Image (cartoon, helix red, strand yellow):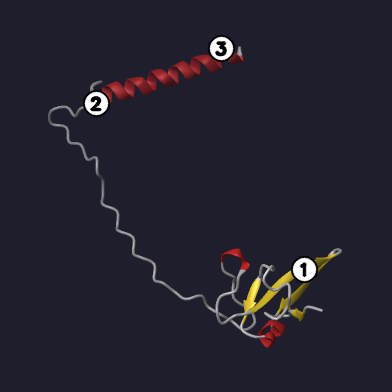
Amino acid sequence: MVKVISVVSRLLLVGVVLALILAGCGGDWKARPGQTVNVAGPKAPSPKPAAATAPSYNDHMGLAPELGGACPSGFPVKGIITKVGVQTQQVYLMPENPNYASTQAYKCFASADDAKSSQFEALK
């Protein structure tokens, strides 16, 4: 019984949609004499170009690295987050570190003091 009702309701819905389509446009998808058609609608405002902004830097937050984890010029200290067991540790690497080139930064800092103020510790 439920399947019959479902099939009948779908057929009725299709019939109503077809009737509305045919009645509204005469079946040929053209405007009838005396009928006006506004296809374009109101003109949308043109988007304003986004202003180019330099990345902001805060001593206590650091700067996001570039793609690939490299730090931008002027921010050579790499802040990374390591996981030791179940604990995470925030450490920073100086450019003199032998692992510096192969390490992807989480944050970049201008100096070791900036990294320390962001709760990063020197890598031991």
Q: Cβ–Cβ below 8 Å for labels 3 and 2?
A: no
- For label 3, the residue is 4
Quadrant location of the C terminus in the rendered image: bottom right
In the image, residue 45 lies at what x, y percent? 29, 58
Q: Cβ–Cβ below 8 Å for labels 3 and 1?
A: no
Q: Earlier in the sequence, mark 3 or mark 1?
A: 3
Are there few (<14), some (14-19), or many (20+) residues within 10 Å of tag 2? few
Residue 3 horizontal side relative to residue 17, left or right = right
Q: Is residue 95 above or below residue 51?
A: below
Q: Is residue 6 above or below residue 99?
A: above
Q: Amino acid at mark 2?
A: Trp
Are there few (<14), some (14-19), or many (20+) residues within 10 Å of tag 1? few
Q: Residue at x 71, y 77 (%)?
A: 93
- For label 1, the residue is 82
Q: Earlier in the sequence, mark 1 or mark 2?
A: 2
For the residue labelled by badge 2, is the local secondary structure a helix, a strand or a loop? Answer: loop
Q: Residue at x 55, y 79 (%)?
A: 73
